[in-house]
Amino acid sequence: MVDEGANYYVSAAVLGTALLAKAPALLRGWRSPTVRTVNALLLLPCAGFVLSAPPTVTAVNRLTGVSNLSALLVHCLMTAYACASLVLLDHWRGDSGDRARTRRRIRGWKAACCLVIVTLAGLFALGDVPVERPRDFDTYYAATPFIGAMLVLYLLAYVVAGAATAVMCWNWLLDIGGSTAHRTRTATDASLRVGLLVLVIAALANVVFGLFKLTAIAGRWAGRDWDVLNACLSPFISVSGMMVGVGLLVPAFGPGFIDRVWHPLRAVAALRPLWRLVRTPGTGPRSTMFLPPPWYAGPEQVLLYRMTTIHDWMLGLCGHCSDAVREQAHRHAERSGAARREAAAAGLAAMFRAAAEARTGGSPPAAERSARAVAAVRAAEAEDRELLVSISRALTAADARADTPVDARIEATTQAGGAPQPG
């Protein structure tokens, strides 16, 4: 019995986990209609998936003594879910639009939803559904008086809500594309665009699903067996519901994920070449004065540790740095068409690579070299907030070329008498 509803229970477990994760935010921001709506969009489909599972249908029927009561409950929950999706979209758009008009539109959605749910319950009570049908309730009772009308009303409401969601999200997506054409796109813009695109696809899938079910019901009315239209799409309704949830949650949590997880992870990976270059030979991460983060640390904490450690090791290399190497590499990058920040990073990358080789060769450090190197790094940091990443990428770009410019610069500087020299 459990295996028969595994796909439903898995989907419910995923949404339930997200709901538990959001519980503290719900308690803190209960007064916010947006927070309440987001949590409703997790709770409603979660309950719908549980009640749709064949084992649950049987259990509800036996517990209440009402045959196929789960079907009514699922239809009501999904109607409320479709309404909540439209309400949340209106809340999001209403932040920058006409709030009075938004409130009126939200009240209209809620009133229509309540009217549909009450009508569904009334038609179910008037109909007769004695045979338990956990999988094909819609098509089996399509020609039953009152129940057929209930099914058509539910599916029409579902299709209309899906179409409205798709149109609203597509128009909003076009508006965002126009508004960001002349300004820098942020993580919020990117998350919103992804979320809206997912919502458009999921809403269109819901429309197709509803139309196929309506076609199967119409076939029953015409005396034809088109139940395959319902059977072939039923397994995908859970996927569609999950897509709607993802589309609604990405704009809410996407910016935080991008800023706190994705960007730090990319920066940590990008810093690896510089980390390896400046690390003191024969030592590990624990050789610095900074304690490494614990294994459960987040990406931001790992990035902070890596940057502070690199800074620490770079200070140990500054006494071996040659300003002549940096200047020559800087000029070479500028002549090659590099931007100002890229040229500065290329110069510093060449300088620290030469310093690492000088330290490996046993050259003693010099205080005046250290002072000039520190001044150069600080001047570059004033113009490039991600200077360490830029230096590391300059190292990677140099290594990727067959004739590494950094090595060529060092060799040319050596022949000109400008290479790092002892003390």
Image (cartoon, rainbow, N blue to C red):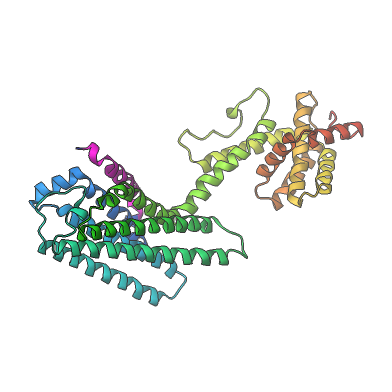
In this orientation, which residue lies closer to the viewer: 72 or 134? 134
Quarter in which the C terminus is drawn: top right
Tell me if residue 318 is in the magenta stretch: no
On whether residue 10 falls in the magenta region, the answer is yes
Whether residue 343 is visible to the viewer of this picture, yes or no, is yes
Residue sticking out furthest to the left: 65
Range of magenta residues: 2-25
- At x 58%, y 63%, the residue is 180
Prevalent SS, magenta region: helix
Q: Is residue 109 found left or right of 147 in the rendered image?
A: right
Q: Position of residue 114 (x, y in %)?
A: 23, 68
Residue 88: horizontal and vertical position, in percent? 37, 63
Which residue lies at the image location 85% right of the left edge and 42% below the top edge?
A: 328
Q: Quadrant of residue 83?
A: bottom left
Residue 27 in picture, x, y percent from top left: 31, 56
Residue 125, image quadrant: bottom left
Q: Is residue 88 left or right of residue 145?
A: right
Q: Residue furthest front?
A: 223
Does the rendering let one see residue 33?
A: no
Vertically, is 272 above or below 224?
above
Q: How many marks?
A: 0
Question: Please, is residue 356 above or below residue 156 in the view?
Answer: above
Residue 4 percent location from the top left of the image: 23, 39
Q: Going 27% across and 61% down the picture, which residue do you hit? A: 155
Q: Which residue is found at the position 65% from the left and 36% from the top?
A: 310
